[in-house]
Image (cartoon, rainbow, N blue to C red):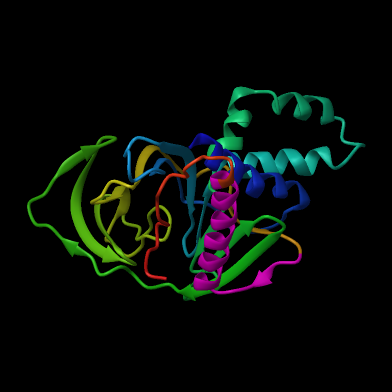
Amino acid sequence: MKCFYSNFLMGLICSGTLFAQETNEMEPAVWECKYDYFALRDTISGETFTTDMMILRIGESTSSFFSQYTFRILDVQAQKADPNNPLLGIIQDLLYDEEYRYYDKNSVLDYIYQNYPEGNMTVQARHEKTVFRYEEPLSPQQWNIIPDSTRQIIDHTCQLATCHYRGRDYRAWFAPDIPVQNGPWKFYGLPGLIMEVYDTDKHHHYQITEISRNADQPVTIYFFPEQKPSTRREVASVLREGMARIAAKNKEKGENPPVYDFMEKDY
């Protein structure tokens, strides 16, 4: 079972060495938020979870969302590609640090930008040797705010909202005293920062761990060469085909791959 995910994710991640990212600093980050992300990867046993640390940077008009581990490993790889870099030895040593080894098993590979370009959401999804890029309208989920629901999260009084989105039912706790409409992943449109959100099956769960005001790092768009214009459904199809190939190989070895579905189930 572990072999299935190790082979699948390593096939995706190792391809990252081919990508050198270019940057475009959009605007200062008014807020930087860190989230723990938990994803159930075996819906039969209900026991196999993967975890990641996600970063949400929010500016006045745009935001970026990505895995801290994915970002750091790509940055390390870009530095290693320059043999004249005086920090090369230090950076190579980082690859042996536990934090960076952790990346190899668990990291989310997508970058998500809200209100970029204006009125849209841009997603960069990497698979093997290809970076797929697609846009979709930036529109809020159909939230239902629950009256008289309160909960304390990192010293903020939060309120509960629910929605159905692309095949899953979600519960989100948001902080009205942080008046931004952003949240992790593609969640958007509540009158306050989303501090925690999870689907009712508890297959996917984002939980905030840290909030910083006026962060040092700006909201930045990361560009990868030779991006392939695509659609959300095409990316889902490519990922399913890739998983099916690996599952078939594991079956030949007598291994039964775990059963799970993507976060967006409406394909």
9 displayed left or right of 159: right
Q: Nearer the viewer, residue 9 or 27?
A: 9
Q: What's the residue at 40%, 51% (across, down)? A: 260
The question of residue 254 being in magenta is answered with: no
Nearest the eye: 100 or 86: 100
**Where the C terminus falls, by quadrant?**
bottom left
**What secondary structure predominates along the stretch shown in magenta?**
helix
Magenta-drawn stretch contains 245: yes
Q: Does residue 246 appear in the picture of this structure?
A: yes
The image quadrant that residue 6 belongs to is top right
Residue 136: x percent and y percent?
A: 48, 74
Q: Which residues are magenta?
A: 226-251
The residue at 12%/57% (across/down) is 146
Say whether residue 175 is visible.
no
Near-viewer residue (16 or 159): 16
- Residue 116, horizontal then vertical, whole percent: 54, 69
